[in-house]
Amino acid sequence: MLGLLIINCAGDTQLAHSIYTYISDRIDNCHTFVSIKEDEIEIDRAELKLTDEEVKMLLDSFLQSNPELEGYKVIKFENIYTVGIPPENAKLELLTCEMCGYTTPFYEELYAHRWAHGI
């Protein structure tokens, strides 16, 4: 289903402006249907007739065309694409349930989860 799509740049306004410029240069007459506010870009896909695959390819193409953005990835969740450096599990210091492998960065959640196992 086509509709409003958001590209979130995780607080990086300069990245958002670069992506906005990149999209504007590649899609004709998009200024009416693409807007930018701080670190987010909104795209009306219904009006531009863009599919999820086309949006993902456009963002991946942007990242590949900028060597200084090595390590950046595009992560999609529902209608939101987040562009940035994904966190590594080791850096998050995740806690793990010994019974089933459930992970969380919060001790309180792990404690409650363990209780469900009867630990």
Image: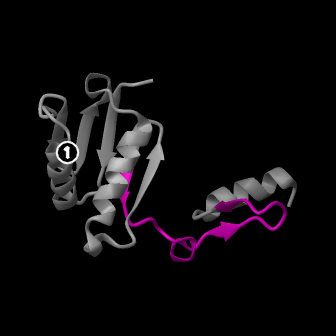
- 65 sits left or right of 103 in the view: left
**Going by the picture, which residue comes out furthest to the right?**
118
Q: Quadrant of the N terminus?
A: top left
Q: Which residue is mark 1?
A: 26
Instruction: Name the one closer to the observer, 36 or 101.
Output: 36
Q: Which residues are magenta?
A: 82-103
| For residue 52, above or below residue 97 | above
Indicate the position of residue 98 as horizontal and vertical percent values: 81, 68
Image quadrant where residue 11 sits: bottom left
Image quadrant where residue 13 sits: bottom left
| For residue 101, above or below residue 80 | below
Q: Amino acid at mark 1?
A: Arg
Residue drawn where x is 15% and y is 53% of the image: 17
| For residue 115, above or below residue 77 | below
Residue drawn where x is 32% and y is 23% of the image: 46
Instruction: Name the one closer to the observer, 108 or 49.
Output: 49
